[in-house]
Image (cartoon, rainbow, N blue to C red):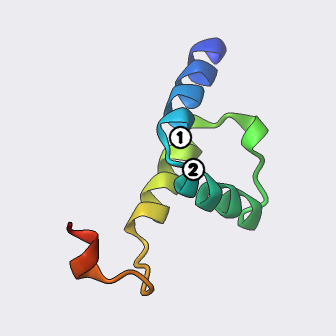
Amino acid sequence: MKETLVSLYNVIWMQCSPMMQTKLKAEFTAKNKSIDDKDVTSLFTDIREVSHRFDSTINPYEARK
């Protein structure tokens, strides 16, 4: 089970863009978590939080192209 969860974590992590990985690393640091924990549930939660966070520096009309 543990090996399967670690494999799942690695697949999900590699599917994230480099920008998303950077944001997730910052999120992990802010929450005093380590990437080495390979916690899939936490990764999904953090991906959802980061992806739903509004970035005021992006023009929404440019992002739709």
Note whether 21 is above or below 64 in the view shown. above
Q: Which residue is the extreme one toward the bottom?
A: 56
Residue drawn at (52%, 27%) of the image: 11
Q: Position of residue 5 (x, y in %)?
A: 58, 22
Q: Position of residue 60 (x, y in %)?
A: 27, 80
> Mark 1 to mark 2: distance in Å?
20 Å
Residue drawn at (57%, 50%) of the image: 18
The image quarter containing residue 62 is bottom left
Q: In the figure, is residue 25 to the left or right of 63?
A: right
Tell me which amino acid carries mark 1: Thr
Q: Which mark is residue 18?
A: 2
Tell me which amino acid carries mark 2: Pro
Q: In terms of secondary structure, where does tag 2 sit?
A: helix
| Residue topped by disc 1 | 41
The quadrant in which the N terminus is found is top right
Note whether 43 is above or below 1 in the view shown. below
